[in-house]
Structures are given as C-alpha cells and as structure tokens.
Image (cartoon, helix red, strand yellow):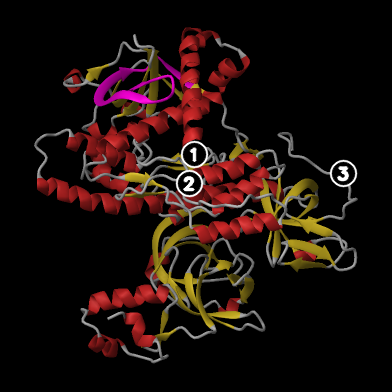
Amino acid sequence: MDIKELFRNNVKLTLKEIQKKVNLDLETLVTILKSLEEKGIIMEVDNCYQSLPNNYTVKEIKGLKNGCGVFYLNNERYTIHQLDLNGALYNDLCLFVFDKITHRAKVKKILKRANDLLVVEVKDDKLKVYGNNLDYQVKVPSNETKKTVEGNRLLVKINNECGNLEGHIVDIIGHKDDPDIDLKQIALSKSFALDFSLEAKQELENIPYEVKEDELNNRLDLRDKLIYTIDNDHTKDMDDAISIEINDNGNYILGVHIADVSHYVKYKSALFDEAFKRGNSLYMLNSVIPMLPKYLSNGICSLNPHVDRLTKSCIMEIDKNGNIIDYKIVNSVINSKKKMSYSKVNQILEKGIIPEDYLPFVDNLKLAEQLSNILSKKSFNRGYIDFQSNDLEVVLDEKNKPLEFIMPKQATAEKIIENFMLQANETVASNYCWYPFIYRIHEMPDEEVLNEVFSFLKKIGCKIPYIKNYTNPKTIQGILKSLINDPNFKIISKFILMGMKKARYSEENTGHFALAYDKYTHFTSPIRRLCDLIVHYLIDMYDNPNLSMEELNELEALLKEASIQASYKERKADEAEDEANMMKMAEYMESHIGEIFQGKITNITSSKVLVETNNIVGTVRFSDIAGDFFIFNKDKFILVGKSSKRILKIGDAIKLKVLNASKEMRTIDFEICKPSYVKTKTLSRKS
C-alpha cells in the first residue's frame, strides 16, 4: 500500500496506527515517513502524522546574516524574524507555517540540518555563533570550556534539532587574532580535517622518498621519452604529465601519464581512510588542505622533473580527425624532462616569445597545440558545451591582503591540458565500462526547469530560439554560441548553467551531458580526488586475473558509498572556496567604504539587486537606490522609479557606492547612485 494514500482525507495518525495499516518493519517505516516529510508531502506534529495544510511548506532557509531568514514560494518572498527561527541555520531544511497576507513565516520544525558543525567565538564567557547577526548562543557542557579563553574560535557539533542550540566542542580552531584563523575555520566548518591521523602518519614511514629498482617490475619504461608537465606557476602537487609524437602512419601518439598513487596508498589503509574522509583536496585562495599528506602529494607521488616516478599511462593513437585508432592503459615509469607553466607555454604558442630553457620543447609544444585544436573541433561537433570558467583568482600581497580579483581566461596551454585529460578520462571509462565502475556523470537537464530559464532570459531581452529538443547538448551549445557576442554573455551563461543539473559521481553510467560523452570518468587527478584514486584501484583489480566474486561484490558496495562521499565533499569544497573568496571581497571593501565603483546589475529579485564590480559581488536593497522609490516588476524583472520612471534592468551598467562591508559576515552592501554621480574608482594593486 502507498503510504501517501493514508493521508488523503487529512487524517491524523500515530506511528502505531500507520504500522497497523502497512506491512513494514518499524525502522523502514520511520525512514519512509521521514523522506515524505522532507519532501513536504506529510508532517509530524505532536506525535501525529498528517498531510501538509495549505499554509505550511517545506523549504531551505536562506538569508540570516542580517538577522532575518527568507524563503521563496511561487516567486514570492517570505520573511522569518529572529524570534521565529526556532534555532534554524543557513540552508537548513525547515517546515514553515506562513501567512500569505503578511508574507511572514515561522519555523515550525527543522527537518534536516545542512551542517551540524558550527564555528563559534568566545565572547563575554558565552559561545556565540560566528558569521551572522542572530546573536545565537550555543550551550556545551561546562567542563568543555575550561581550556578556552576570550576570542577563541571553536568548532562545535550541534546535537539537537530545534530551539536553543546545544552541542559539544570538537576542536579549538585558534584565536581570532591568529593569521590563518579564517581559512582554518572555513575548512573545519565544511568538515575538512586539518591534520592526518597518527596511523596515517605512521604508514608514511614505510613509503620511500624515491622510486626503488624493484618497483619497476612489469612496468612500461618510458623514462627516455619526451614527457613533461604543464601546470600553474606555483603548483607542487603535479599528478599529470603528457607526451606526444607522430608515428609512421602519420597519426598522433598521445600519452597521458598519471601519478600511480594507488601503488603507495593501499586500499583500506589508514591513508586511504583519510583520503575517503576528505573526498578531495581543498583549495582556498593561496592555500591547500591536501587529500593526502604533502610527503606524498608534493613528494613521491608528484611528477617532479628529473626524477623517476611511477605512473599509470593512457597511451592513445589518434588520427588527424581526432578519432581513437588504438590505445593501451598500462603501469609505467617516467622521468619528466621539465616542469612547465601555463604562462610560459602561452607566451611561446600565442606570442612567439620563447624563454631559453624552453627551446628544446618548442616543436613538441606546437605538435601538442595541433592535436589539441583537432580535439577541440571534434568536441564542438559532438556537442560539447563550453560555459567558460567562472573560477576566481584572488591576488594577495605578502600579508595576504587582497589586491584584485581576476577571472583568468582559458588560453592555449590550459586548453591543451584540458583536451588531453578529457580524452584520457573518456578512454578509460570506455575501456572499463563492462565492469562495476565509477563515473563522472552529468544528467540531461530538466525540460521544465530550462523552459523557465529561457522564458526568464527572453523577459530580460535575450533572443532565444524555439527549442525542440532538450536532450541534445547541441541545442544548449547553439544558444550559447548565438549569444557569445552579447555584452552580458557572462550573466546569461551563468543563468543557463544554473538551469542545468550538477555533475556528480555515480556507480551508474548515464553519460556526461555537457561534455557530450556517453561514458566519462575521472582518472587524471588521484593526488587531489578520491574517485580518481578509486579508478586506479579498479584498473589494478581488473587487470588481476585472480579477482574473486567476493572482491567484486565488495567493490560494488564501495563504489556507491564513494560516489556519494566524493560528490558531497566536492560541494563542500566549492562552498568553502566561495566563502573564502567572499571573505576577501568583503575585506577589500572594508577599506573602501564610501567610494564609488563602476558596476553592473547581475540579477534582480523581489527584495534586492545583485551587483558586481571588478569581479566583486554584493547586494543593493531597494531603499538604497538613490533618487527615487523603486518598484519591482516581476513580469519583466525590472525596477521602475515611482517618480522618475527610471528603469533598472539586469545587465545595466551602474555606479555603485560602498555602504557597508563585513569580512565576518561575508557581505558587501552597495548603493546604486544617481546616473550623474561623481567619478568612479577602479581596483588597483596600489590601493
């Protein structure tokens, strides 16, 4: 019997009454009821379950930094005042009771915490939640605070669902005046451990710092080949190298050589457990919290130049149309001939400027560019969707103060490495797809969601053609191509990207929509990503003719668990990176209060305007638009001045005055100035 049917007539049932009507054990029943509650189908109040009344809804809570929570229902904004939050925190899934007339709401129940780890600060002998204006205090056992002092930042695990926050101290992060406290607390609040277990450190003692002769057995020796790495200038954990040549048939022989981390980090070891816990390395600003200890990530596993390194090589024969003619995936040993940087390779290939130490490699780099262009053309014809990178680079001074915020463009060298890694990942996925495997998937977009996105884009003035087929990535590719010269392309492509599903890891292959691949995995970064490391384990296991059914069954269970963990930790790493960037933006603007910048409107909601200046993002309240009272037109997503009839729309160039900025709250508040305001300011490394 469908449990949902029990609640059709607004009946109220206890757990015992429900169990009598269905043939399920108690544990299974409770799990199903909890799932229905989180989906907003039923609710449990006063130990009774019932269908959701019309004035109740289930939503994730937003806002909070300025003291109030918000959620949106049918494009209308509802506000939850501080006294009605019931202990809710940002992104918590909550059951709300709301009033359609006043647009006020209350948190009736917290259904699912987004994060049970909180950063708190010791202030006046109280533990106050850091990073919002809610004045939330956290209760912990008194014996846990004996070693804390005023100004300490603590990591607290919350153990209650609603009401006053209660928990226990997990870690003393440090003191608010410590130079690295901010990044530490971001990492810990996203469940990234700062140190490795004693057992993992002990395992490092048995791992050599150089490749031994007896480790070369049954490996393809590629040490005499012209192999090199291309990476960022300051990268120390290099897990991929490339080689390229032409064979007698005139075809390209592309080698993608990846650090053989699985040779050192054994499955089920303490080091593997640490990698599993982290899911990936965490990169924030100019720092990294590695998935594996630096002894490995920067040492024996890093493909440093002029030293032997153990690798897994995907060696592909590719014709002049970009087709794979043949390939092999083998354990190998390499000796990289040079550590190259993207910037220097781009100088060579784009400007003809050749540093002396790169002279022996110029012809080979041009050959790599040649093949990369072929693969780019093939990818485009296949339907590859290029959303362009939104990765932000924060330039810091020697004291870690922000100087400027730039969006690096993908140049020739970066494209070479991307194309070669994509090809290797696809080749590996295709070779092992007959076995239990782990894939990087990107599911087809939801037609209804994309329709809403394109309808919105039409309202803000974009010319969107009639769309017949959402299942073909060429459709999205064509729309982006048609809009590439629009001055607001960055804003437009971001909206389209938001309408797509998120890429994730899965043990079930559904293909990669944006890359237009039927099969795709992550094989090329085992130093930094859990799933790449597991793919390396799988390669070794499937090359073992003595693999047992018991091992195979165990593998299948691991793949599902690892996919969930890696996808979750990837999202947490993205959140941490965004928070660190926003912190630095706010820190920069704290010293520019009252100054004027040239900016652009990137979005308008029913309550605020989102703006950007020099890649710094912030918000404008309607009341902070100078010169008039502005009214939101929800049909056209514009603001109209009541007296002046001035229209503000997404994409408009505007002048912004910095009103407030808070590094602690990660917020920047701007004012939109009158059109004829004073001279604007631009960011400068001297400021």
2 and 1 marks in contact (CB < 8 Å) = yes
**Drawn side of residue 92 relative to residue 100, left or right:** left
**Residue corresponding to mark 2:** 472
- Helix, strand or loop for the magenta stretch, by majority: strand
Q: Nearer the viewer, residue 658 or 530?
A: 530
Which circle, 1 or 3, is nearer the viewer? Answer: 1
The image shows residue 80 at horizontal and vertical percentages of 60, 76
User: Residue at label 3?
Assistant: 679
Q: CA distance from mark 1 to mark 3?
A: 45 Å
236 to 282, vertically: above or below: above
Between 504 and 195, the one nearer to me in the picture: 504
> Height in image: 580 above or below 43?
above
**Lower sequence index among marks 3 and 2:** 2
* CA separation in Å, label 2 and label 1: 8 Å
Residue at (34, 9) in percent of width and height? 248
Q: Which residues, given as a range, are shown in magenta? A: 316-340
Task: Residue under label 1, please give it.
Answer: 383
Task: Point out the tag, 1 or 3, that comes first from the N-terminus.
Answer: 1
Q: In this view of the protein, which residue sits in the foreground, 114 or 22?
A: 22
**What amino acid type should be assigned to the residue bearing mark 1?**
Gly
Residue 404 image-quadrant placement? top right
Dot 3 amino acid type: Lys
Please rate how many residues cluster around mark 1, counting C-alpha atoms within 10 Å: few if below 14, some from 14 to 19, many from 20: many
Quarter of the figure that contains the C terminus: top right
Q: Secondary structure at mark 3?
A: loop
Mark toward the viewer: 3 or 2: 2
Mark seen at residue 238: none
Q: Is residue 318 magenta?
A: yes
- Residue 87 visible to the viewer: no
Going by the numbered disc 2, the residue's amino acid type is Asn
On the rendered structure, is 469 left or right of 544? Answer: right
Decide which of 552, 613 is in the foreground and name it: 552
